[in-house]
Amino acid sequence: MKQWWLDERAYAGKEHLDESYVSGYDRKAGFDPTDDIEVLEALGLSPESVVVDLGAGTGLFTLAVAPVCRRVVAVDVSPAMTAALRERVEHLGLDNVTVVEDGFLSYEHVGAPADVVFTRNALHQLPDFWKAIALERAAGMLRPGGILRLRDLVFDFAPAEAEERIDAWMSGAVTDSAIGWTAEELSEHVRGEFSTYSWLLDAMLDRTGFDVTERSFRRSVYGTYTCTRR
């Protein structure tokens, strides 16, 4: 590893390395991958497909997609997350799932090129310089015409609107951190993590070999992108 290369685990957020936090993560995140699976199946996800789940976390997407594809590689930089996911995979007897303790910048894909790369709420852990490299690497995992499905905190507004939009976002925060993110946690995210503007992410995707076929935003901060690798 080059001396200047980023240590992703140091940027992962200490809570994601904490076993007690990981044990309650699914309830807090409240994530249902059903819509993502349906979109991907409409775009060609099949029992022959290879899927890479980057920033897989506790594996909700991995476990949902495994029954409808040939192979899933679940990649996460957190030992606590990968341990929890391996336990689930073993419990369910899923023989087409490989769990890898790596990150966007360290995972080396082997075997058939991926048909789908999925990532949710993980890319924002990387500064923009490294986001672009991560997206370039994701493109390298995919076959031409393969699909990138990206969900993340992405700011879909102009800098002059930041105060108004962020305040509006905070107003919808929960008060119980066990079932979602509080205003204090969201504020910490804005101050200390690396969510980027949509117009910057759009340019990164284009420069790294993707065509954006669909993009949508909820509350101007939760972005969903569907992209095709050129």
Image: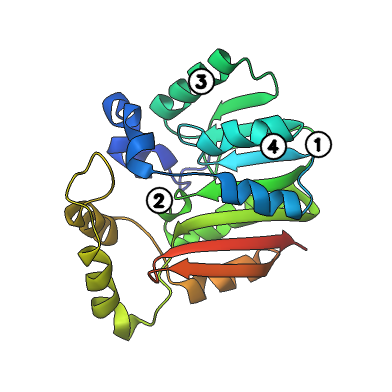
Viewer-closest of 109 and 189: 189
- Residue 5 is labelled as none
Whether tag 4 and tag 3 are in contact, CB under 8 A, the answer is no
Disc with the residue nearer the chain's start (3 vs 2): 3
Answer left or right for 37 relative to 15.
Answer: right
How busy is the neighbourhood of tag 2: few (under 14 within 10 Å), some, or many (20 plus)?
many
- Residue 109 is labelled as 4
- Residue 88 is labelled as 3
Can you say whether 182 is above or below 161 in the image? above
Q: Rounded to the nearest whole Å, what is the CA distance between mark 4 and mark 2?
A: 21 Å
Q: Judge depth for marks 4 and 3 and give the one in front.
A: 3
Say which residue appears at 35% left-offset and 40% top-offset: 10
Circle 2 is placed at which residue position? Answer: 125
Q: Name the residue type under label 3.
A: Arg
Say which residue appears at 72% left-offset and 35% top-offset: 68
Q: Rounded to the nearest whole Å, what is the CA distance between mark 4 and mark 3?
A: 22 Å
